[in-house]
Image (cartoon, grey):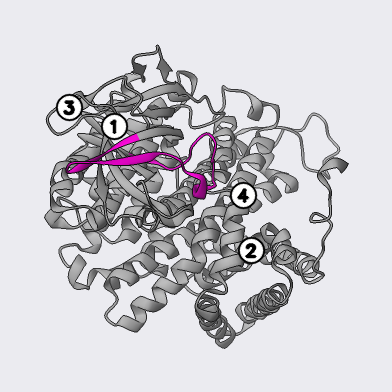
Amino acid sequence: MASLLLSARNLEFLLFEWLDVPRLLARERFREHTSDTVRAVLELSEQVATEQFATHNKRNDACEPTFDGTRITVIPEVKAALDVFAATGLVGAAMDADLGGLQLPNTVAQACFAWFQAANVGTAAYAFLTMANANLLAVYGTTEQIEQYVRPMLDGRILGTMCLSEPQAGSSLADVATRAEPDGEGFRLTGNKMWISGGDHELSENIAHLVLARIPGAPVGVKGLSLFLVPKYLPDGTRNDVVVAGLNHKMGFRGTTNAALNFGEGAFTPGGRAGAVGFLVGERNQGLAAMFHMMNEARIGVGLGATALGYTGYLHALDYARSRPQGRPAGSKDPSAPQVPIIAHPDVRRMLLAQKSYVEGALALILYCARLVDEQRTAPSASERDRAERLLSILTPIAKSWPSQWGLAANDLAIQVHGGYGYTREYDVEQFYRDNRLNAIHEGTHGIQALDLLGRKVVLDDGAALRELSSAIEETVEAASAAGGELADLAAALDEAFAEIVAVTARLHSAPPDIALANATVYLEAAGHVVVAWMWLSQLLAADPAGGDFYAGKWQAARYFYRWELPKVRAQVELLASLDVTTLEMAPAWF
């Protein structure tokens, strides 16, 4: 029976027929692996996700963590699943072998982890944060920090977090107030952090918090932030002064503890002195640059999670539509005739096709970005590595936000396909929607990503990243045009849409910044639609329309996206080009 989590056949297509993972495996870093080992680790991921993660997804949602003022309690299935996950070696799937990692291509590692996010995003979140934490420390940590924390993370003995937000600051990191006073070889931190996923629990021997804080005398704003490793337990086993102020209870991700943390408020006094002991990671006042290593990875990971939730919702809706009899064909006049499965009704097929176009387009985008990470690290020439870095830079805000918006739209349609049953807890799709709604907030809202894309990424280095994106899209357009027929028609539509994005980008940057950025979220959505249209055209170059049902489905989903979704871009571009100030001129008192 086909999985209701993800499509193994689609992953096979994306990795082996489209992204050409075998060519990656020929590179020095990956030569220990073959296509067979890649397929084996994908099958292992599906098996563990299905047997260890999916089995407690609903219970994880219904029995969220509790805090009695001293101790946090999490259902035991979470630890059992994380222990099995760690035993597979997948925590370090893409990390160096000499650190204990599997040294797989990042493209493969992301495809593997999608299974776990689709199966149980609440439990998978602990592993997700730990992997990003370990990857940051592997780059910026000292040899001692790597030995004491990264290796145990790969074994599952330490789990990790990222601590940025504060109650008074939210997303405004310039207003971070947590302080770090020098104290011998380390620092003593005092302050409060908010919205810390995995902030406390008893799922591991220790928790490694990566904390942004200010050293006295540091510059104001984000230029004065430093990064610190603050463990729950110090190397000698002493309890550090990091305590839970309370748990936040969100509409989704209910199986993941989300805490307000107090640092250095005297609940514990390690070494007999006040303050939570922290160890500097990287250089002083360079904390945000180091943290962005984790944040950018997390942004793509959030996009992957949003895709996975949208994908599993689609597959659940598809299964329901095939098995649920209701009604008769429009032309049937006989009320005694047998009912037909609802997939026979055109509007249900419309909703399913929309979902397929969103989730398969989003998955292609995320795995394309994962492939860019591999190119950035292992491409044979410096120019190829630089090209990958520029493309990844401009695509990251889209890869985070587009799946978060349209994966959620897919979940909304999955509920609609189920009808009244879709809103009940007996069916899974209402939980997928609640879980996925959080991804529009995780690692920066749509508005933050939009400001990053329009206000920074498209103009960085005199527009180098936008030119790189233009070149990459043009390569696909030329290949599709040369193929002729329907591919050429789709290529022409993509070429025209992207030209409109380029033109409106120039128009916006000729305007005053407040006017240009007032409608930045519209720009993000329009650019995202064009990028996903590119992903669809690129996939079609590898999909033989006469190759059977799988490929025919690919083509039909692409047709849907080009006929129903891509035309929306023109209206958005026209709005942007008008430099509309309706929202900008709305006075607060008028609400």
Q: What amino acid does circle 4 point to?
A: Gln
Characterize the local packing of mark 2: few (<14), some (14-19) or many (20 or more) Cα atoms within 10 angstroms: many
Q: Which residue is mark 1?
A: 276
Q: Which residue is mark 3?
A: 271
Characterize the local packing of mark 3: few (<14), some (14-19) or many (20 or more) Cα atoms within 10 angstroms: few
Q: Residue at x 43, y 22 (%)?
A: 245
**167 shown above or below 129:** above
State which region is magenta. Answer: 161-189
| Mark 3 and mark 2: Cα distance apart in space | 55 Å
Labels 4 and 2: the sequence-earlier one? 4
Q: Is residue 246 left or right of residue 21?
A: right
- Of tags 3 and 2, the one toward the viewer is 3
Q: Is residue 352 left or right of residue 46?
A: right
Q: Residue at x 49, y 51 (%)?
A: 303
* The one of 101 and 148 positioned closer to us in this rendering: 148
- Of tags 1 and 4, the one toward the viewer is 1
Q: Which residue is mark 4?
A: 405
Q: What amino acid does circle 1 point to?
A: Ala
**294 shown above or below 73:** below
Q: Which residue is mark 2?
A: 529
Q: Quadrant of residue 380?
A: bottom left
In what element is the residue under mark 4? helix
| Mark 4 and mark 3: Cα distance apart in space | 48 Å
